Amino acid sequence: MLRVILTIVQVFSSLAIIGLVLLQRGKGADAGAGFGAGASGTVFGARGASTALSRATAIFAAVFMINSLLLTYMGTHSVGSASQPKSILDVAAEKAGDKAGAAGQGANKPGLTPAPASTGSGAQTAPAPAPSATAAPAAPAAGAAPAATPGQPATTTPPGAPPSGPTPK
């Protein structure tokens, strides 16, 4: 409940800061007075709104900072639980431990595959050797037509016959 209240105060203070900053005049606003913008400062009096708006902005900025610190403290320290805060690695280790325990208890559950049983002798098995790469690929049969290259059709002309089609000039 307190976190919701602090979040509402955070949003309100941030919107107030944005509004107050947009209402304030910039440092270059006095330069426009010589070009006909001299009446713009008469709305808030002779001194203008710089002191009131600056104070309100400073107050809302202080509220925003303190509220940010409180929300950060509440986010890192669990309110109402006696356990210490956990990191992502702690949670992942607990889940891995839970999965290992579940695999030993219920191997019939879908998605759980038990590890293969060990031989008990302590000997480790080696992976199977790769097939030998010394054998050369088979050569094409004598008199066979060459394979078509990509983008060209295969030819069916027997060996020794003149090529059909246009001849280059």
Image (cartoon, grey):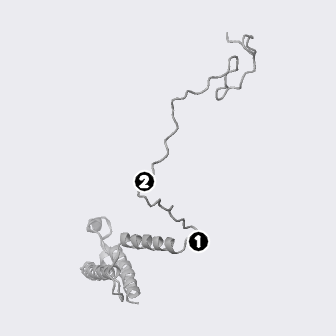
State the residue in front, 20 or 79.
Answer: 79
Q: Name the residue under label 2.
A: 124
Above or below, comparing residue 103 to residue 165 in the picture: below
Neighbour class for label 1 at 10 Å: few (<14), some, many (≥20)?
few
Q: How many marks?
A: 2
- Type of residue at label 1? Asn
Q: Is residue 140 above or below residue 115?
A: above
- Disc 1: which residue: 108
135 to the left or right of 168: left
Rendering coords of residue 148 (x, y %): 67, 26
Residue at the image position 37 percent from the left and 69 percent from the top? 89
Instruction: Answer yes or no: is residue 133 visible.
Output: yes
Quarter of the C terminus within the rendering: top right
Question: Is residue 45 at least partly visible in the picture?
Answer: no
Comparing labels 2 and 1, the label whose residue is closer to the camera: 2
Dot 2: element: loop
Q: Residue at x 70, y 16 (%)?
A: 143
Q: Which residue is drawn at 47% across and 59% down?
A: 119
Q: Where is residue 131 in the image (x, y as percent from the top left)?
A: 52, 38
- Which disc, if any, is residue 133? none
Please tell me whether residue 129 is drawn above or below residue 12 in the rendered image: above
Residue type marked 2:
Gln
Report x, y in % for residue 126.
Answer: 45, 48
SS state under label 1: loop
Depth check: give the residue in front, 3 or 91. 91
